[in-house]
Amino acid sequence: MVVPLMYCADYRPYFTIHDSEFKEYTTRAHAPPPVILGVTNPFFAKTLQHWPHIIRICESSYFGKDETINKIVIMLDSKPGVYTHYRPFLHKDKNILKKLLKGIQTKRPCEVQTALLKRHLLELTQSFMIPLERYMASLMPLQKNISPYKAAPTPRPFNPDDFVATLGTSGPQLTTGIKGDWVGLYRRFFRSPNFSGWFNARYREVSQKLQALQLEALSDADVKMWVQGKQEVEVVDMILRIRQKLEESELEELHLSDATRNQLRSRMADIIYTLPEDLKTVLKTS
C-alpha cells in the first residue's frame, strides 16, 4: 500500500503465542509497537482487540477448504473488514470510489479492480514523496563549493518546518486534487519508521554522491602543485585517503566510474613520486 515507499517497520506473518515477543505485543501497559502481525489463532481476536488497526479476513477462498477456521470465525462473529481508530488527515477521493463502485455494478474482474486501486495508491504515494525528494535535493551543497583537497561536504540537516513551508507552492494537494490536512499527515509521517528508513537511505545516497563528486574533482586536480609546501604527514594522509576510497569503490560501497578510478591511481602515483625514497618504498609495498 505504500509502494514505492519501502515498509521499514517490523512484520510477523505467522505470529503465535509461542513467539518471544508475545507478552510485549499483547500487553496493554503501553501502545502497540510499529509492527504488522499475521494471526489465525482465535485467541488473538480478544487479546489484540485494543490494537488500533485490525484487518479481519474470513473468506473461505483465502483459507482454502479448512472448515475449522471458517467455523471459528463464525463463532467469533468476526465480520471481514478494516477496523481502525485512525482519523484520516485527508478527505475521501470520490473519483476512485466511483470507479470501484462502477466496477462492482458492471461485474468488472477482481484483478482489474485490484489494479485500479494499486495504481491509485501508487500515484498517491508518489505525489506525497515528490516534495520530500525535491526538498532533499535542495540540501545538497553546490558542486562549485566542493574542494578536491578537503573532505566531501555533508548534506544540510533536514528541517521539518522548512520543508512544511514549501508545501504551499509545491505540495501534493496541487497534483492530486485531494484536500485535507497534508501538513498534519507529513508531521505524522516524520514520526514513523518508514520515514526514518527512507531518510537514512536517501542521506546515504546523497553523502555517497558528494564523496564521488569530491573524488572526481580530485582526479582532475593538479596534485603536483598542491603538494608543494605541504608537510609529509599531510601528503601521506592524502595518499591513504585516496587508497581507502579506491578500496571502497572496488567493494561497491562507493560508486566511481572506471575513468575516475584510473585517474585517482595516477594522481596517487604523482603524489608518491614527490616523497623521499624511504617513504616511496613503504607506500608502494603497503
Image (tube, helix red, strand yellow):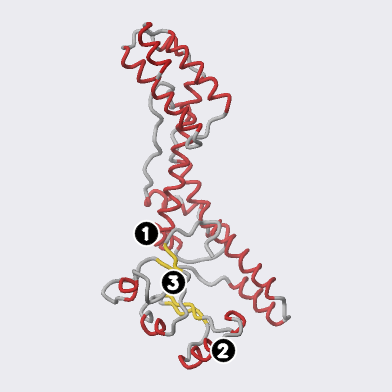
Q: Which one is nearer the viewer's eye here, 178 or 285?
A: 285
Residue 160 to residue 57: above or below: above
Q: Which mark is residue 37?
A: 3
Residue 141 to residue 268: above or below: below
Residue 79: percent from left, percent from top: 51, 87
Residue 157: percent from left, percent from top: 36, 43
Residue corresponding to mark 1: 191
Q: Would you call the spot at circle 2 few (<14 residues within 10 Å), some (14-19), or many (20 or more)?
A: few
Relative to residue 20, is residue 256 drawn left or right? Answer: right
Q: Earlier in the sequence, mark 2 or mark 3?
A: 3
Residue corresponding to mark 2: 67
Q: Which one is nearer the viewer's eye here, 161 or 63?
A: 63
Q: Secondary structure at mark 3?
A: strand
Select label 2 or label 3 by which is in front.
Answer: 2
Select label 1 or label 3 by which is in front.
Answer: 3
Q: Secondary structure at mark 1?
A: loop
Look at 39% across and 57% down and name the residue there.
190
- Asked if marks 2 and 3 touch (Cβ < 8 Å), the reply is no
Identity of the residue furthest to the top in this view: 277
Q: Would you call the spot at circle 3 few (<14 residues within 10 Å), some (14-19), or many (20 or more)?
A: some
- Mark 2: amino acid: Glu
- Mark 3: amino acid: Leu
Relative to residue 44, is residue 101 drawn left or right? Answer: right
Residue 143: percent from left, percent from top: 48, 29
Q: Secondary structure at mark 2?
A: helix
**Image quadrant where residue 236 sits:** top left
Look at 39% across and 62% down and name the residue there.
188
